[in-house]
Amino acid sequence: MRVTLTGVVQGVGFRPHVYNLASLMGLKGYVLNSAGGLTIEVEGGSIEEFVQRLTSAPPPLAEIKEVGIEPLPPLGYHDFSIRESTDGGGLTIIPPDIATCPDCLREVSDPSDRRYRYPFTNCTNCGPRYTIARGIPYDRANTTMSAFRMCPDCEAEYHDPGNRRFHAQPNACPSCGPSLKLLIRGEVSAGDPLSGTIKLLKEGRIVAVKGIGGFHLACDALNEDSVKTLRERKRKSNKPFAIMCPDVETARGFCLMDEVEEEALLSPRRPIVLLDKGFISPIAPSVSPSNMRLGVMLPYSPLHFLLFEEGGFNALVMTSGNLSEEPIVIDNGTALQRLSGLADAFLLHDRDIFMRADDSVLMVAGGRPRLVRRARGYAPLPVSFHLDSGEVLSVGGELKNTFTLLKGKSAILSQHIGNMENDEALGFFEESLRNLKAIYRIEPKAVAHDLHPDYMTTIWAGRSGLKAYPVQHHHAHIASSMAENGLTGKVIGVSLDGMGLGPDGSVWGGEFMTADYGGFKRMGHFKCVPMPGGDMAVKEPWRMAVSYIYDAFGDDAFDIIKGLGVFRERDVEGILNMIKKGVNSPLTSSAGRLFDAVSSMLGLCQSITYEAEAAIALEGACQRPSGVYKPSSGDDRADNSYPLNISSYTPMVVDFSLTVIGIINDIKKCLPTDIISGRFHSTVAEAVGRTVERISGLTGLKRVVLSGGVFQNRLLLDLALDALNGRGLEVYSHEKVPTNDGGISLGQAASVSYRILSGEI
Ligand code: ZN
Ligand code: ZN
Ligand code: FE
């Protein structure tokens, strides 16, 4: 019988697993890695039982997608063997990078083991994969480990099917593998690099540490002076730094954590998990200034474990080693050149990183883990996809960019690329695309892109030589969530978002639609208001506050604003004039801008230093010293929302001017900010519930799909899920794919693929 397995079946210890099982059952034949996955030929025993045992208990990191069984005439094999890889086309999957396993950790901390204190220890169950793979099949020769020749001991492990390191491609030890080097002011430090690094960190220094998917900038997260220095050097913004804690118990001393969050932290994929600070945290304030959350991760390489074990740190800042919005740095030369103004020292190693991958970021909302940045530990695992459309590329949007390649029934999402605003980001985009196309052997025939003509990605698509098709931004958001949830047919889509270009040329972002993959109909939207100063109104939320107050109060706006006393009056007059005359004031239905405006009215944030800062401050305002505001039943703030208007005609206009009047009245009454913010969140959720209910009544549709960056607001997502579930609707939201613009490439690809299949394009 020939058995073929597809999915994540290479680089996860599957061949020794097959070998051991076949030997145990006395079967003959062979197993090999093929470009399609894993091919096994077996004869001479109970083959059904073999297949059953093989597929019911695969190795821990394996994910079997399809099992093919084909009867063959017996050939009279003499034994069972592991054969050289062949290369025959099809879809092989390179596994993502996985955190160090307990067996390897035990060796690293055992003084009698030959891998004692060795920072590059790994085995078939753990270690780098995607970041070191240069091609398929996934063999040592096709990884950056090909530069290291295994010593006899490592070689013996590598060839012993009974060993945990049988065909572990990055297998290495202190005598044959990569090593560390500490550079201080350009000089190689003479002592032990690890101890030297620990000493520097304890002195409050900033060290650039080469990791799995790129460089981190590390410093003691409890030392405010160090963190402040890092913040001043790295960026003039309040964007939070992630921290790494040695274990869950220590992390619990810094933030609140429920079971789902704990499980996510401990997952071998080791994402950064966004946790509520919840109380006065001993973490240095400059780690995440004026932000209710802390991004926390646990160690995932032996180097991290050793830093904590020997340094005794409770928390280290581990932020991406890059200049503001540039891609994370991966090679030693670039690090020394570009990070020298940021770091006091460099902890380098000589195992090359081939593919860069930032740390992934995850949050828990509605009791479910949700990725908000999908990179290390997840990419390049495919997301299963139900259409089979041939090979399509989609290039995503402008911010938090990812791209997607479709092949067969798989969607391969790239790792997080970042904001497409500079040549470095474009270079990262192109190099990842080249690599994933090569690994998965995909030659796309068509490319999907955003409707916005000026996005770098749109321009790239136009010049790619492929047939290019635009997909509207919010339709792509909804299609992305549909694809992730395996939905077909028509749904009601709710896309609450920052901004995306609408087909009418205005800036959309608070959208209700009926949609399938092929297209959509706008059924409702947040009322359009002017954005005085265009892009300036995104950077300065107070401009949106003026706009919304003018929308609600008309000519009384100036006096109302004067009464609030949160903005400079002279500026307000200028902005009011711009709005009245319609000068440089494009209209927008963006939900993100409404959150910005309310945040500004409450005096929380008047100008932002990073995306969504004002909205994050508004959500954070619901936090009290006693804990985080959660919309539990019977809570007066959840029940008690502000009035709003929804027009009876279609597309329905969801008008928050009464909400704004209510907020201003509450501010005048000096109601606490957490209550006003809580009520506002409930109001938006109520607006979603009522609008969707009406659309459902008109169309008979019961399935509701949520997407868009604003749903990264956990409080809003929780409340919206309640509001929709409470109305008997079936609600779908993102988990595996980001709800923000990191997810739109999947929706673009799904839409174009569907239109190709239906013969529309
Ligand atoms: Zn291991
Ligand atoms: Zn060795
Ligand atoms: Fe968006």
Image (cartoon, rainbow, N blue to C red):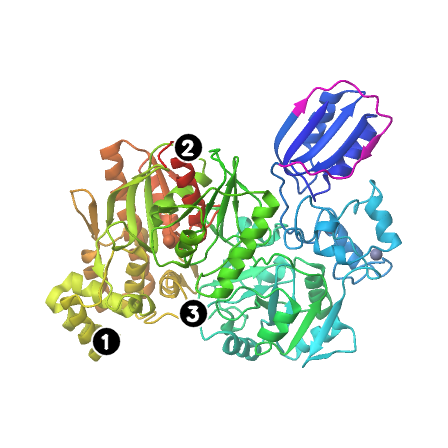
Within 10 Å of disc 2 (Cα), the crowding (few <14, some 14-19, many 20+) is some
Residue at image mark 3: 290
Mark toward the start of the polypeptide (1 vs 3)? 3
Image point 39% across, 40% down: which residue?
A: 751
- Residue 653 is situated, as x and y percent measured from the top left of the image, at 20, 49
Q: Secondary structure beneath disc 1?
A: loop
Looking at the rendered image, the quarter that the N terminus falls into is top right
Kind of residue sitting beneath label 1:
Gly
Image point 66% across, 80% down: which residue?
A: 203
Q: CA distance from mark 3 to mark 2?
A: 49 Å
For the residue pair 86 and 299, the one nearer the viewer reads as 86
The stretch in magenta equals 69-89
Residue at image mark 2: 757
Image point 43% across, 69% down: which residue?
A: 290
- Residue 597 is situated, as x and y percent measured from the top left of the image, at 28, 64
Looking at the rendered image, the quarter that the C terminus falls into is top left
Left or right for 528, reference 126: left
Picture quarter containing residue 756? top left
Residue at image mark 1: 565
Q: Residue furthest right?
A: 152
Is 615 included in the stretch rendered in magenta? no
Compared to residue 621, the image places residue 707 above or below, namely above
Kind of residue sitting beneath label 2:
Leu
Left or right for 250, reference 53: left
Within 10 Å of disc 1 (Cα), the crowding (few <14, some 14-19, many 20+) is few
Left or right for 648, reference 29: left
- Residue 412 is situated, as x and y percent measured from the top left of the image, at 53, 44
Is 88 included in the stretch rendered in magenta? yes
- Contact between marks 3 and 2 (CB within 8 A): the answer is no
